[in-house]
Image (tube, rainbow, N blue to C red):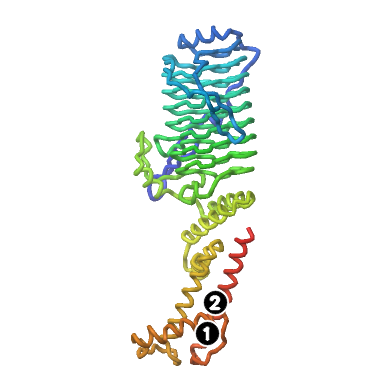
Amino acid sequence: MGIFKSKKSKGIEYKVQTFYKPEIKDKPPQINSNSLEDISANEAINIIKQNLPLENKRIIGDLIMGRQDLENPYEIDTENGQKIQMAGLPGMKDFERWPFQNKIEVKKCVFEAKVVLSGMDFKKVVKFISTRFCSDIDFQLSIFNESLTIYGCSLEGSTIFSDSVFWDSVQFNRNTFNGPSDFYNTSFQKGASFAYSVFNAHCTFTNSYFKSTMLVFPCLAFTNAICYADCYFMDTRFDGIADFGGAQFRRKVDFTNASFKYINLKQVQFNWLELKWEQVGRKKLIFGSLTLKGINVEKEYLTEEEFNHLFQNRVDVDLSEKHRQYDILKGIFLKQGDFESTDKCYYDWKQIERKESDINLNPETWIVKIFHYLNWFSCGYGVKPIRTLLFASVLIFFFGLIYTILNSSFTLDLSLISRDNILVNSFLDNIEYSFLVFMNFTSDVSMLGPSLKLLFLIERILGWITLLLFVTTYTRIMLR
């Protein structure tokens, strides 16, 4: 992820872009199969234990450095990304992870068989660059104390990182996952990036935790990733910016019960989205890159209060840009028959439009602003029919009050303002009369002077409009 500053007339602004390092935009180095040296798995292990890099090698046989028997309960994966422990079997017992003190640096290699590094405690950096794994790679129940990088790799078998803990940054940029990838119940303490990666089989991040210590960095960067199979983020917690900008989900992506702090869904393509609008809401959506004013890029850590202050005073995107994203999400919810999320999404958008629409010397802007407020109060932008009843009650009360305090000459009659007349007799009678006029139940204007007949006509028109508004709004919701 990068932070770039630009000088403005009011000071310095910093644009926070949602990628970890600039090199993920570049293509990774390619493997030259003709130049690979064949070695056994044991020879590869000896090279790694000598703290030497492993480069341009073809590793023959299973490379096993971790614990194969972790005393796990027997688990099966369901189609919706959940894991089920079979009844009657004991749960996982406590065990000591095997500490590994050397760094692992592998570049442009091919692993012909399994790579098992499960149940380990990695003390140093682990890095795989432009490497092909022809079979499964297993890191489950491991701890990574420093950064993990798997960049530009081809993973043909299963990729397993379930129940692992990452204390430093994690980068899975520009990888191709041809087998299922399992990140179930995994903790990312300094964020993770899967930018430009391709998932050809289902991937599972269910019950995982994404956190970013420097809050301007995304806790998950899924930018421009492509998922050709189902992707699961059920019950996942995103404690930071979850950036899915430009990602493509060709099948289903499931965010059931996932919790977000902030989320970027700009230019995301969905085929089927399992998400409720209240999970994201209008206060959590980010519309592309952030531009923060006054951020100190030399500071290693931002407190929650500092970030919230910068975020509230950020340079926001145009209203048209927000409109496009809200329309896309509303269309997805509507297509899937989630009318509740559709209405909530539309309502939140209209609230933003009402609050952020400009007012200037052009009279049209004032008319538009008034219309926004009237639309909000009268029917909740067409999604809250009960509010129409409240609007009608206010109008009936208002006209009843006008009929009471104004006499036939259209001037204020102070003699009517007494406890006996206005509060008990005249006012109640006029409220009843106003109700009949509003509902078009009467055409009697004998009690009105010539001037008040104009109010009678206005109230009758408003009554017809309000009744039509209520019927159309309520009918649309009932037909759903």
Q: Position of residue 462 (x, y in %)?
A: 54, 77
- Count the labels in the image: 2
Relative to 112, say whether 399 is above or below: below
Residue type at the position of mark 2: Leu
Q: Position of residue 252 (x, y in %)?
A: 62, 39
Neighbours of disc 2 within 10 Å: few (<14), some (14-19), many (20+) = some
The quarter of the displayed image where residue 305 is located: top left
Q: Which mark is residue 50?
A: none
Relative placement, left or right, of 43 versus 294 is right
Residue type at the position of mark 1: Phe
The quarter of the displayed image where residue 246 is located: top right
* Residue found at the far front of this picture: 88
Residue placed at 54% from the left, 48% from the top?
276
Relative to 454, say whether 252 is above or below: above
Q: Quadrant of the C terminus?
A: bottom right
**Residue 362 visible, this angle:** no
Relative to 142, say whether 417 is above or below: below
Q: Position of residue 25 (x, y in %)?
A: 55, 32
In-front residue for pair 431/464: 431
**Gap between marks 1 and 2 measured at Cα:** 10 Å
Residue placed at 47% from the left, 26% from the top?
164
Q: Secondary structure at mark 1?
A: helix
The residue wearing badge 1 is: 456
In-front residue for pair 151/11: 151
Relative placement, left or right, of 339 versus 399 is right
**Residue 238 visible, this angle:** yes
Q: Position of residue 213 (x, y in %)?
A: 39, 34
The residue wearing badge 2 is: 462
Q: Secondary structure at mark 2?
A: helix
